Structures are given as structure tokens and as C-alpha cells.
Amino acid sequence: MLQVSDPQDLSFANHTMKAMLDKAYDTIQPDLVVFTGDNILGNHLRDARFGTYHTIKTDAGEKRRMIKAIDHIIAPLEKRGIPFVFIYGNHDDVNSITKEEQAEIFKSYPTCVMPEQPDPNLDVDTCYLPLYSSDNAKEIFRLWLFDSAWHDKKEKRTYEYVKPEAVKWFKECCEANKRSTNGIGIPGLLFIHIPLPEQMNLLEPCPNGTGGIRIRLDDSETAYRLNSKLAVGALGEPPCVLEKNTGLFDAVKSDGSVLAIVSGHDHTNCFDGTWNGVRFIQTACASFRCYGDRNRGVRLFELDEENPTLFKTTHFTYSDLCGDGFLSNLRYIMDADGMQKYKYPLLAATAIGLTGITTGIIKYFRK
Ligand SMILES: [Fe+2]
Ligand SMILES: [Mn+2]
């Protein structure tokens, strides 16, 4: 299965991201896609493409644009018959449309395999998807999906934590799981948009000027890097973890059936590490519309039904999927957010070059 995190785009979606995802679906041919939040850039749906012309002023208009933005990421799966599930990120519901209405848009696609909400006290995207053995005889794996942020539409504020009800539900499910399997439990992966605070333990302070990421804690700023004894991968920004700890880590740790907590949210962080017996997998964004770096891509998880606890994970970047040639790089520079400092000089140089050639040709023929 493929994790696509933070595709985070609008009703006019970025063509290079779409090309990258198409390439991922065609070459990897996943059996399932898990969207791990910031699936759309929900807080900018009303914006105009340029200036203020064509800004949307009504809720109905906003919903039309949301439907279009969602279609950009789901239609490619629909076309290929690839099932998908989703969780929300902090950017998804910062608009007039509720999470429930948004879930209805996703669920209107026949390839959506999102389970029914197990408890009305939970968010629509908090649930688990059971995976069965190929003979359908038994459940062999569980994909836990957790909501981690929601927007209070009246207060106009985003809250970033896992609701205590969701942690309670998780513990109850795990206890039932143990009872029904004689104490063994069913292994699984837990997907959550915003990383848990405990993920910070994968970092260590490092001397200034040695390539660490500067993180401001209390009054002082210190450089941090991934602790190479605990994690491998890239730390591109200070991890932006949940603002409040409601005990999900402790619940995962004491149960032991979750093989890894998989998150997105930090667009330039892409690593895999273990702290205190719990594995954290962090995936970079897919978005070209929002900030990111050359780790923009998708993450593959491979499960073997004979031995599901030994899953394999590989991250594929834009270059891995679309190649590292001149045209692929040119496309990246022209279309990726953050590349403006190369894009505009390149466009200017091309314009100057073309003007020079045209003037030369005119002069030649006038002789
Ligand atoms: Fe994001
Ligand atoms: Mn986010």
C-alpha cells in the first residue's frame, strides 16, 4: 500500500504533482492508498488563482471547489480501480464544510473503502480498516486511522490533539483484540497526520554550524539533528508535533500490537526511527503547491501475509518516480513551490536568449 501525505492542493491542481502520483500508481501498482491528511488545501479554496478576480464568496461555491480539489486526487485511483482510505490534516476542514460532508464526497467514490465510524463520539476519520488473509479466512492486519486536528468553525481556531475519547476507544479495541486472539493481538500500523510529541525523542542537540535544524524551546534556540542511533532519514524542519498529549503513545506502547506510528504534516521531514520500543515513520509531502523539498514523494508499505509483522517500507521521491534527467528537473523547477529563485531567473534568461535569437534572425534577413 502507498501512503500519500499532504497532497494539499486546490481546485486547479499542480500538474507535476499529478504526474508524479500517476507515475507512482502505474509503476508501484498499490493495492491500497492511504491519504494521511492535508489532502486538500482547505483554507485556500476561496482564493483566486491570480489577484482577487474569481474569489469565491459563498459556501456553495466553496463546496464546488472542494469537490473539484478532491477529484484531482481521487480520479486517478478511480481510473485504475485502486481502493483508498483517508484521514484529515489541519488544512482539510478550515472552511465552511464539515468533516462529515467532506467524508461524503470521498465516500461517493466506489473505490473508497473507509470503514463506518465505529463510535459517534469519534471523528469520521477515526476508525480501523481490517485486512484479511487472501483466502478471506481471518483478519491478519489492522490499519488504524486517527484524526489529529479539527477546526472550530465558530471560534475559528484549529485544535491539534487526539481526542481522549479516541484513545479510550483504541484501548478498548486492543483489549478486545487480545481477548479474541488468546493474548497475541493483531499487528497493525497507525496512521495519524500530526506526529506525536514523543517523536521528538528521535532528535539530539548538535553543535551550531554542523547542519542541524534550529529549534526554539522556551527562550533559547538550539540546533538538533536525528539521533543516528535511533533513526535514519532526513530532518528538514523542526517537527511540529501535537500541541497536547492525550496518551496515545502510552496506549500504543502498553498494547504492543502497533508496529509503527506513521505520520505526515512536516513536509520536509522523512525518516524512520524507534524510541522506547515504538517505531515512528515520518513521510514527506506530495504537494508541489505548498512548501517542500526534493523528498516530495510517496511511501510504500509491503506486507507479507505469512509474516505481517515484518513489513517493509520504502520512500520514493519525485526523482525516483519521474527520473533525474534535464526535463524532469526543469519541470520540478517550474512547478514546485520554493523554486521561484531558480524559476524566474531561468525564465528571464530564456526570454533574453529568445529575444537575442529573434533579433539576430531579423538582422540577418534585413541585410
Ligand atoms: Fe501539510
Ligand atoms: Mn498539516
Image: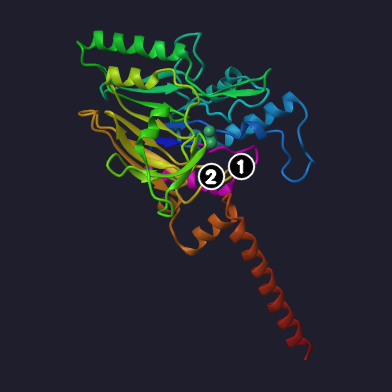
Would you place residue 12 above or below residue 360 in this image? above
Horizontal side of 308 relative to 356 (left or right) equals left
Would you place residue 179 above or below residue 187 in this image? above
In the image, which disc is placed on residue 13? 1
Q: Which residues are magenta?
A: 6-28
Residue 19 belongs to magenta span: yes
User: For residue 81, which quarter of the picture?
Assistant: top left
Residue type at numbered disc 1 = Ala
Work out whether residue 128 or residue 197 is closer to the camera in this orientation and state it.
197
Q: Which residue is mark 2?
A: 18
Where is the N terminus found, in terms of image quarters?
Answer: top left
Residue type at numbered disc 2 = Lys
Q: CA distance from mark 1 to mark 2?
A: 8 Å
Question: What residue is at 58 percent from the left and 31 percent from the top?
Answer: 91
* Secondary element type, mark 1: loop
Work out whether residue 15 or residue 98 is closer to the camera in this orientation and state it.
98
Horizontal side of 301 relative to 196 (left or right) equals left
Q: How is the image coloured?
A: rainbow
Question: What residue is at 63 percent from the left and 38 percent from the top?
Answer: 10
- Residue furthest to the bottom in view is 367
> Residue 71 in the image: x percent, y percent?
58, 33
Where is the C terminus found, in terms of image quarters?
Answer: bottom right
Q: Is residue 191 visible to us here?
A: yes
Would you place residue 201 above or below residue 340 in this image? above
Q: Residues within 10 Å of mark 2 (few under 14, many from 20)?
A: some
In the image, which disc is placed on residue 300? none
Q: Are marks 1 and 2 in contact (CB under 8 Å)?
A: yes
